[in-house]
Amino acid sequence: MTSRSKITSVLEKDLATVLNRHSQEYASDTPDFILAEYMLACLNAWNKSVRTRERWFGRGKREVFKTAPPKKR
């Protein structure tokens, strides 16, 4: 498993846990792990769209964090 897929796997599990903790799966009667998978697919689609937009404008890859990302609590 690559580092990126490991992070995605952990993130997906964390999202599912949070969705379940807050009973967000009840509104749609959809299991929390499916909602987490959907949310990550949306995030991936958004990131792809942003990269496409930046290429269209002729801009290169930008540095997202000027400093290190915030630490987990």
Image (cartoon, helix red, strand yellow):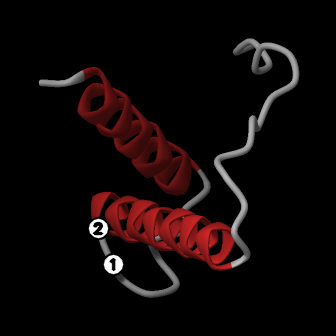
Residue 17: image tag: none
Q: Which residue is tagged 1?
A: 30
Of discs 2 and 1, which sits in the foreground? 2
Residue at (87%, 24%) from the top-left corner?
66
Residue at (41%, 50%) from the top-left corner?
16
Viewed as shown, does residue 70 lie left or right of 32?
right
* Amino acid tagged 2: Ile
Viewed as shown, does residue 14 lie left or right of 63?
left
Contact, CB < 8 Å: mark 2 with mark 1?
Answer: yes
Is label 1 in a helix, a strand or a loop?
A: loop
The residue positioned farthest toward the bottom in the image shown: 28
Q: Quadrant of the C terminus?
A: top right
Query: What is the crowding at mark 1: few (fewer than 14 residues within 10 Å), some, or many (at least 20)?
Result: few
**CA distance separating discs 2 and 1:** 7 Å
Residue at (29%, 21%) from the top-left corner?
3
Percent of width and height locating residue 29 = 36, 83
Quarter of the figure with residue 54: bottom right
Is label 2 in a helix, a strand or a loop?
A: helix
**Residue 40 vertical position relative to residue 72 in the rendered view, above or below:** below
Viewed as shown, does residue 16 lie left or right of 72?
left
Residue at (46%, 73%) from the top-left corner?
45
Q: Quadrant of the N terminus?
A: top left
Tally of numbered tags: 2
Q: Nearer the viewer, residue 5 or 48?
A: 48
Residue 34: image tag: 2
**Residue 22 vertical position relative to residue 73 in the rendered view, above or below:** below
Viewed as shown, does residue 68 lie left or right of 36?
right
* Amino acid tagged 1: Thr
Percent of width and height locating residue 46 = 56, 71
